């Protein structure tokens, strides 16, 4: 149980284009989903917290107009990197917490998406 | 603000031996959760073990167990009978209330055959 999927796993795009990454909780409903960025050999950096039916909460320094987050249902959140540039190349990971049950405090992670911007 | 410190950037252990990964944290709260996550080369973050601070009993999951010392704010992970598949980055993490998950810097564990 508690499986989270991400799509795509890898994406290469040209500079200036937009890329959408999907995060789905497959066997549970998640009121809250999280988006992280991870640089090589570093820990995860929280970008934003996505709440179903409301606006996302962005961490300090994260441009909300560049990283658009939509959490339209209890099983799906999307991250759109708009007008991507090479410096946006990174590994993006989502996570989700069950909205009921005994482990609402626990985040389950997707497999990540490697974004390369040329 | 809460902080999590993993003082061992790298650790190695012989296959079938036992290894302990250290983690300390700083908080003024009394109710919180602690986690160990494993990130193998695939980069999929996998939950290894979870501890609720109000529980005195140390959490155990098969070969993985923790030594939770609340007063010392220490949360170490012990891996018994190490296997090659245990090789990964291990992250200690802290969660209090509805706040964000705070990660340590990670410890890279190598298993020597």
Image (cartoon, coloured by chain):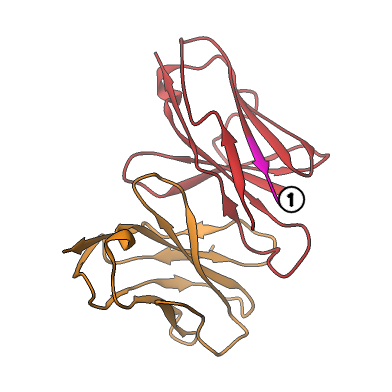
Residue A25 painted magenta: yes
Residue A6: image location, x then y, percent: 58, 37
Image point 67% across, 32% down: which residue? A78
Please name the predominant secondary structure of the magenta segment in the image: loop
Magenta residues span A23-30
Q: Which picture quadrant has residue B55? A: bottom right
Residue A22: image location, x then y, percent: 63, 32
Residue B4: image location, x then y, percent: 44, 65
Image point 45% across, 47% down: which residue? B44
Can you say whether A79 is above or below B80 in the image? above
For disc 1, the marked residue is A30
Image point 51% across, 81% down: which residue? B59
Quadrant placement of the C terminus of chain B = bottom left
- Residue sitting nearer the eye, A91 or A88: A91
Chain B pictured colour: orange
Circle 1 SS class: loop
């Amino acid at each position: 149980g508690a499986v989270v999927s991400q799509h795509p796993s890898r994406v290469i795009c040209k500079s200036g284009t937009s890329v959408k990454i999907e995060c789905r909780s497959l066997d549970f409903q998640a009121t809250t989903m999280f988006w992280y960025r991870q640089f090589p050999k570093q820990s995860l950096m929280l970008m934003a917290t996505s709440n179903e039916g409301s606006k996302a909460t962005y961490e300090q320094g994260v441009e909300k107009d560049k990283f658009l987050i939509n959490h339209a249902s209890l099983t799906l959140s999307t991250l759109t990197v708009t007008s991507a540039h090479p410096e946006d190349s990174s590994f993006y990971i989502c996570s989700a917490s069950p909205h009921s049950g005994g482990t609402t405090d626990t985040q389950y992670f997707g497999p990540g998406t490697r974004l390369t911007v040329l | 603000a809460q902080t999590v410190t993993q003082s061992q950037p790298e650790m190695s252990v012989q296959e079938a031996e036992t290894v302990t990964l250290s983690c300390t944290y700083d908080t003024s709260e009394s109710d919180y959760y602690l986690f160990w996550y494993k990130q193998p080369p695939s980069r999929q973050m996998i939950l290894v073990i979870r501890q609720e601070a109000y529980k005195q009993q140390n959490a155990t999951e098969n070969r993985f167990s923790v030594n939770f010392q609340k007063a010392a704010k220490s949360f170490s992970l012990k891996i018994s009978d190490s296997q090659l598949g245990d090789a990964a980055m291990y992250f200690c993490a802290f969660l209090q209330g509805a706040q964000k998950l705070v990660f340590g810097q990670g410890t890279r564990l190598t298993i020597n055959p």
